[in-house]
Each structure stands twice: as C-alpha cells, then as structure tokens.
Image (cartoon, helix red, strand yellow):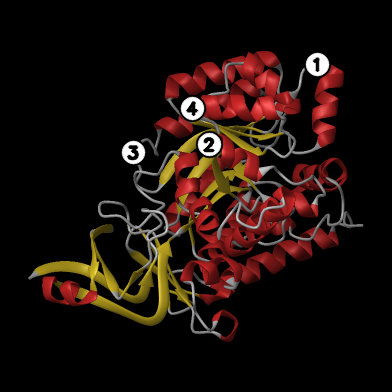
Amino acid sequence: MQHCDTLIAPRWCVPVEPTGVVLEDHAIAITDGRIVAVLPLEKARAAFQPTVTVERPEHVVIPGLVNTHTHAAMTLFRGLADDMPLEAWLHEGIWPAERRWVSAEMVRDGTELAIAEMMRGGITCFSDQYFYPEIVAEAAVDLSMRAVVATPVVEFATGWARDVQEYLQKAADLVHDPYADHPLITTAFAPHSTFALSDESFSALRVLADQLDVRVQIHLHETATEVDISIRDTGRRPYERLVDAGLVNRSLLAVHAVHMNDDEIARFAEAGVSVVHCPNSNLKLASGIAPIAKYRSAGLNVALGTDGAASNNMLDMFSEMRTAALLAKASANDAATVTASDALRMATLGGASALGVERVTGSIEVGKWADIACVDLGKLNSQPIYDVVSQLVYAVRADQVADVWTAGRHQLENGRFTGIDTDALLQRSNEWRDRIAASGEIQ
C-alpha cells in the first residue's frame, strides 16, 4: 500500500481535461502538494494509506478557478466610484484616489483582502496588474495563493516608479529575484493600455519581454471611445499599434477585447493571442459585450477574469462563468454557443493556458499541483442534480465552496479558513474606509 498525504473522496470530480468528463465516486490522491492519482474510490482505498482523508459525499471537486485579470488591491476602492462610464470612472474617480492613497501598505492590505475573498470562492490562482507588484507577490506567498504578478508600465510617475525606464527595470528585477523559480509566483509585464505608452516605450518593452521570456497583458479595445481616441491621435487602432510594436504574438493577453473587428480577430487567432473576458466589469462600466462566440469560432483561447473590485465589486468567478455563458448565447442568438462545460474550461484551464501555467494548474491531472476546489451541491438552490457541470455554472453560488487546496495545502476546510485571520482583514478594511471617508474626497 502506497502512502499519500491527502485523499479527497467527493461524490463527483470534474477534471476539465478531458473536456466533458464527470467522474463519479472517484478519489484524488495528493503527495508533496501534487496530484499523484485520480482513480475509483474503492481502488484508491486499496492502493493508498493517506495521512488525511477528506470525505465529501454531496460535493463536486473541480480544478481551482483561475482569475485571469485582477487589480487585487482595489478591494479597498470597492464602491468608491460606481455608476460611471470607464473614462469618467478612471479620470474622475479611480486615478485621483490612486494618486492619494496607493502605497505599499494599501497594496498589502487590499491584496490580502482580495486573496481571502477569492480563495473563499474557489479561486486558487489570480493574475494581478497593480502597483507595488513585489508586495502583491509577498502577500500571495504569505497566504499560499498562486499568482501571476504583472508589473504595471505607464509613462507617468507614481509613488512606485518615476518613468518608463524605472518601471521596466523594476519589472526585470522582479523576474530575476526572488521569483525566477518560485512554485507559486510567475511574473509578467502589464502596460496599462495603448494610450498610456508611446510607440518608443512599447518597443523597449517588447525587447525586454523577449529577453526575459515573459508574457505581456494589456487592456485592449475595452471601449469604443478608446478606439476612437487612438484613431484620432495616432491614425491607428490600438491593435495596429501593438502589431507595429511586435507585441501581437503567443505571449500576449488581450484583456477585455470588446471592440475587435473580424480581421483583428482572425489575426489574433493566427498569432495565438489569448483573450481575457471580464463580462461583469464590462457590463457595469457599459463598455460593451465582447464577441466571445466569434473568438471561440476563430480558435482563440478565451479566459475569464473579474477585473478589480472597484469596477466589478465582486471577485466571484462563478458569477463570471454564468454571465459569460449567458451573454455569449444572447449576443450570438445561439443557446449552445458557450455551454456550461465551455464556461468552466474558460475559468480553469483556459485561464491557466493564457497565463502560461497550464503545465502546473488548471485541471485535475496527475503531476500537476493540487490546486483544487470542492463545491457543496447539497443546497436548495443546486438541487435536484441532473447535470453536475450545469449546476456549477448556472446555479452554484461562491459561498457553496467548502474546501480549497493550493499546491496541496488545505486552505479552506469545510467553509473555514485554516490560515487566514478574516477578523484582522475586516478590521484593516474598515480602517481604510474610515481614512478615505474622513479625507472628504468621496462625493
């Protein structure tokens, strides 16, 4: 009999890879943080002697969800500038607040709050794009959360960097030390948008990204106004500027990509670009509806993200899955265009593939890290059960997540955190609210 650290025994397991498979009465064996076997429960009991057995008879195990686009620290700006279109939201609400409040302390507290919220909802990996990325990485490591930390790059000075050269240098430093081979942290570059960088800066970024072999993620074609301004000021659509800079390739993550034409979609597919769809944020900011059916028909990899809590208000990937599927059906006039299975894949392996971490996470497969969420289907709103995957996407709430493992570490056990002090997080959140409200800057 073989030893393993943990044996998880749920009613169902949806490994995501292969697509469409639902395993019933199977177990997942974990040793040294990795999945070592997925096999029928009776065979597992005969083959393994676990240190811990987790029995979940009314639950389904899925890969940990991958939130492919966040600004985690912006949890502390949740509700600060609601009911505004994107340009006004940025210029009148968020950017003034960031100039006043963003600091290493704010990023640490906001990121920890976000990690706890995401983990409670079954997310085991997130891709972040915010200032003080080294603090984001530290928070993720301290709370044992997988993260792709994308370093912001803009032309203007902030409290973190003075100019493009310093942004790029700090990004390069983060790639090399101390996260070059870290089991939880991957790094990337995150130019904010095409209107935030000159052509010369994009060229410098491309050279460095190629040298360091890191991915680039950028807000692209998020609104029609963004596209119109780019044409007015440069004579080119934002997409064309990225082509000219040599950035349209397999390493690019186009975040939002709401307003793409058919030629751009075809060229994205040919280049192997991934699209990060943030449906709830796009709806709330009235940015539009991304043509997901067209992306998938063209062969593009589509991932899902929540965006930040300032534009979405929730970091809930179950909500994103449901909204993404419903929007795609309505906009394509085809109820089958994004199925429940498609949406779940977008929220797991699709995200991992977009971030370049699909070899270690995103599906329940032998050899991958045990990044796993266990969802309780024995609730009123998810009964009766005819199709497990449909229930996950169309009926489940985030608070039905019972257990979460990240790299085999049991982070959430039967609905309770094992290593996060939520009372302390809530206290610090309230302190930030009081400081920001007392400043008189909230209208």
- Label pair 2/3, CB-CB below 8 angstroms: no
- Three-letter amino acid code at the position of disc 3: Asp
Q: Please name the residue shown 48% across and 27% down the image.
A: 172
Q: Amino acid at mark 1?
A: Thr
Secondary structure at numbered mark 1: helix
**The C terminus: image quadrant:** bottom right
Q: Quadrant of the N terminus?
A: bottom left
Ranked by sequence position, the earlier of labels 2 and 3 is: 3
Residue 234: numbered disc:
1
Q: Determine whether the residue tagged by mark 2 lies in a helix, strand or loop.
A: loop
Sequence order check, earlier mark of 3 and 1: 3
- Viewer-side label of 2, 3: 2
- SS class of the residue under badge 3? loop
User: Position of 258 compared to 269: left or right?
Assistant: right
Q: Along the polypeptide, which appears first: circle 1 or circle 4?
A: 4
Residue 162 shows in the view:
no
Q: Amino acid at mark 2?
A: Gly
The residue pinned by badge 2 equals: 299
Along the line of sight, which residue is nearer the eye, 274 or 330? 330
Label 2 neighbour load within 10 Å: few <14, some 14-19, many 20+: some
Dot 4 amino acid type: Ala
Q: Report, in whole angstroms, how far the alpha carbon at label 4 lies from the one at label 2.
A: 32 Å
Which label lies toward us, 1 or 4? 1
Q: N-terminal of the two: label 2 or label 1?
A: 1
Q: CA distance from mark 4 to mark 3?
A: 14 Å
Left or right of residue 71: residue 385: left
- The residue pinned by badge 3 equals 181
Residue bearing the label numbered 4 = 172
